[in-house]
Image (cartoon, helix red, strand yellow):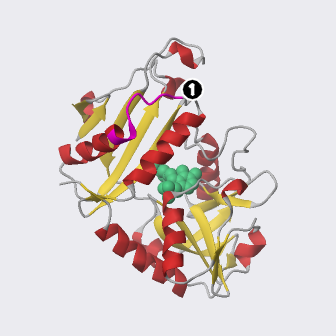
Amino acid sequence: MKIYIDGQFYDKENAKISVFDHGLLYGDGVFEGIRFYNGRVFRLEEHVRRLFDSAKAICLDVGLTQDEISAAVVETIRQNELRDGYVRLVVTRGCGDLGLNPSLCPKATVFIIASKITLYSPDKYENGLHVVTCATRRIAHGALSPMVKSLNYLNNVMAKIEAQQAGAGEGLMLNEQGYVAECTGDNVFIVKNGEIFTPPISSGALAGVTRAVVLEMADELGLRVLQPEMTRYDIYTADECFLTGTAAEVIPVVRLDNRVIGDGLPGAVTRRLIGRFHELTAATGVTIY
Ligand code: PXG
């Protein structure tokens, strides 16, 4: 395995980041998770754009242009001779003395791993996930914008632990007001009376790249999508529910808090979207080779 760090490639054993890197010391940095399928990077430009928006929001100078970062992602996949997989692209504040002042760090650290990721077992894609609501709330806009895909994932990790301890496949996170935000690493959607609903970004959802793909696919299929504030009641009483994410892709949900959603099976609209999603991922994206 070849890992990109600051313009050079290292074997896995030698791919090391300093203990003085503020990404490690303070979670000071941003990241992206990007998938590639069939020799093409899916929605690369969207991911890189979001990375730069996240960086801008935390006053982090990436030190490379968007085109240079995109080229580095593609080159990392090439160096590993992969056609299908998952890229972790990370930009940290860089190395500096102790103290959380970012001006202690002269230069950002950029590293890229091209590997694989499996969030849920294949049977969950067939039969649907069981989800529980977590007591841990989604980070509030007043603390750190939930739009920033930062290296501070501890509250999502705490929510994931809750879901795991409850024996559920995924955890639903609410915002401080009690409205549905998203799951621990996925956006949430429901289908009700032939219309699709997803919480607005203002509810604390990450502006997911896969979420945007679903909005496009729904438009193409002539399905209306609404983005009202949503409560758990909306999910309990939905006809269908599914989650989206780069790592998760599109996955059905059949239970929330032990309420069966719809008839308890992945729904027709969900299946249609999953089918179209696979067509798009197989045939579109930036060519690697
Ligand atoms: N919400 C959150 C909080 C996320 O971190 C998504 C939604 C989905 O967004 P995209 O753009 O991927 O459709 C994410 C995505 C990982 C990992 O280990 C990354 C995410 C989720 C789960 C695992 O790289 N980020």
- Is residue 266 visible to us here? no
Q: Residue beneath label 1, please? A: 26
Image check: 58 left or right of 127?
right
Residue at point 50%, 47% (across, down): 50
Q: Quadrant of residue 121?
A: bottom left
Q: Is mark 1 within 8 Å of ligand 1?
A: no
Residue positioned most to the right? 177
Q: Quadrant of residue 11?
A: top left
Structural crowding at the residue carrying mark 1, measured as other residues with C-alpha within 10 Å and reported as few (<14), some (14–19) or many (≥20): some
Q: Position of residue 200 (x, y in %)?
A: 68, 61
Q: Position of residue 232 (x, y in %)?
A: 75, 68
62 part of magenta stretch = yes
Screen quadrant of the N terminus: top left
- Stretch in magenta: 60-67
Mark 1: secondary structure: helix
Q: Quadrant of residue 263?
A: bottom right
Image check: 130 left or right of 11?
right
Counting the numbered discs, the total is 1
Residue at point 74%, 68% (across, down): 228
Q: Position of residue 33 (x, y in %)?
A: 43, 49
